[in-house]
Image: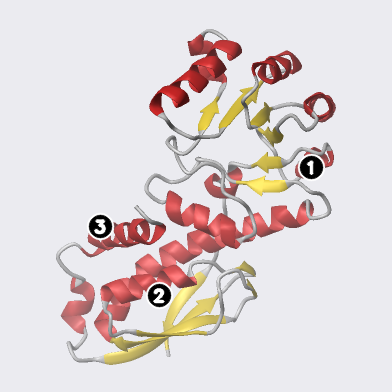
């Protein structure tokens, strides 16, 4: 599927979950021919995300609704700003309201957090990555929000990258076995996937380098000094990524260790709500 097809499927399923056999609250008290207009009021400070998705949602609810866009995804916003207005059938606006708000509040919170963490490491060459720690069936919009906030997407799922983690290593009988089996599997299946391997110590870093064919070594829960040593050992042999409990207090020091990437699960799994409202005007 293309991203557009995935988004359409997401919207269809989300509306089915919310609307069921009808928006009876609106159908019961709003005239069937009533027209109205509402705007998306921003009640927070940060980075707005989800405007393009909101347009898709309103179009899916009712293709006759008209959206007048005043801001773009990725814009810095403040309390009181207006992102867009939507006009047309009153019932249609109300039917799409909650899905639009739920998505935009989630996406804007993620984009805001991503932009903030990115700003902390902007003086380095390190790139900020998300993870698979997302809400089930919401991954497509959460990773979209990370991109809007200036971050980069890690693998989308289990199918688009080989990522050998601690349990894979232990179950496979060691790090060398795991890597060799993965390389053989890719050749047998005629698949062209990057291989990333998680290292728990410097000894494993060396074993990964000796095995060859790995695109990136993930330095999991390494302290600063061990990270610097690992980066020095790895050199230009492959990419490096720091991961594991990295916070706003530690991200700068990890970036200064000269790793290529830092992955932060909290970009998507630990966020505060971004306050937005759809108000009639």
**Residue 129: % across, % down:** 62, 46
Residue 27's image quarter?
A: bottom left
Vertical arrangement, residue 113 with respect to residue 47, above or below? above
Q: Residues within 10 Å of mark 2 (few under 14, many from 20)?
A: some
Q: CA distance from mark 3 to mark 2?
A: 19 Å
Q: Residue at x 28, y 80 (%)?
A: 63
**Residue 125: % across, % down:** 79, 48
Q: Is residue 58 visible?
A: yes
Residue 79's image quarter?
A: bottom right
Residue on which disc 1 sits: 255
Vertical arrangement, residue 240 with respect to residue 75, above or below? above
Q: Residues within 10 Å of mark 3 (few under 14, many from 20)?
A: few
**Residue 205: % across, % down:** 71, 20
Q: Nearer the viewer, residue 80 or 265?
A: 265
The disc placed on residue 55 is 2
Q: Are marks 1 and 2 in contact (CB under 8 Å)?
A: no
Q: CA distance from mark 1 to mark 2?
A: 37 Å
Q: Is residue 110 visible?
A: no
Q: CA distance from mark 1 to mark 3?
A: 42 Å
Locate residue 124 relative to residue 199 in the image: left or right: right
Locate residue 221 relative to residue 153 in the image: left or right: right
The disc placed on residue 17 is 3
């Amino acid at each position: 599927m293309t991203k557009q097809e995935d988004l359409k499927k997401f919207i269809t399923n989300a509306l089915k979950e919310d609307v069921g056999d009808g928006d009876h609250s609106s159908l019961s008290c709003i005239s069937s021919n009533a027209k109205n207009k509402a705007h998306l009021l921003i009640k927070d400070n940060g980075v707005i995300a989800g405007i393009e998705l909101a347009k898709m949602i309103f179009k899916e609810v009712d293709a006759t609704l008209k959206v007048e866009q005043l801001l773009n995804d990725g814009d810095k916003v403040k309390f009181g700003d207006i992102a867009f207005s939507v006009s047309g059938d009153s019932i249609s606006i109300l039917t799409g309201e909650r899905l639009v708000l739920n998505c935009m509040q989630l996406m804007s919170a993620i984009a805001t957090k991503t932009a903030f963490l990115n700003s902390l490491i902007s003086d380095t060459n390190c790139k900020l990555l998300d993870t698979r720690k997302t809400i089930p069936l919401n991954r497509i919009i959460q990773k979209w929000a990370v991109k809007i906030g200036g971050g980069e997407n890690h693998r989308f799922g289990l199918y688009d990258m080989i990522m050998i983690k601690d349990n894979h290593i232990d179950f496979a009988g060691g790090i060398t076995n795991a890597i060799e089996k993965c390389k053989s599997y890719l050749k047998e299946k005629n698949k062209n996937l990057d291989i990333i391997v998680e290292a728990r110590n410097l000894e494993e870093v060396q074993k990964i380098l000796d095995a060859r064919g790995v695109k990136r070594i993930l330095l999991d829960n390494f302290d600063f000094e061990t990270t610097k040593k690992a980066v020095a050992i790895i050199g230009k042999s492959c990419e490096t990524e720091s991961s594991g409990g990295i916070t706003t207090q530690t991200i700068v020091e990890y970036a200064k260790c000269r790793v290529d990437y830092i992955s932060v699960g909290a970009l998507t799994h630990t966020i505060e709500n971004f306050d937005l409202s759809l108000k009639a005007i």
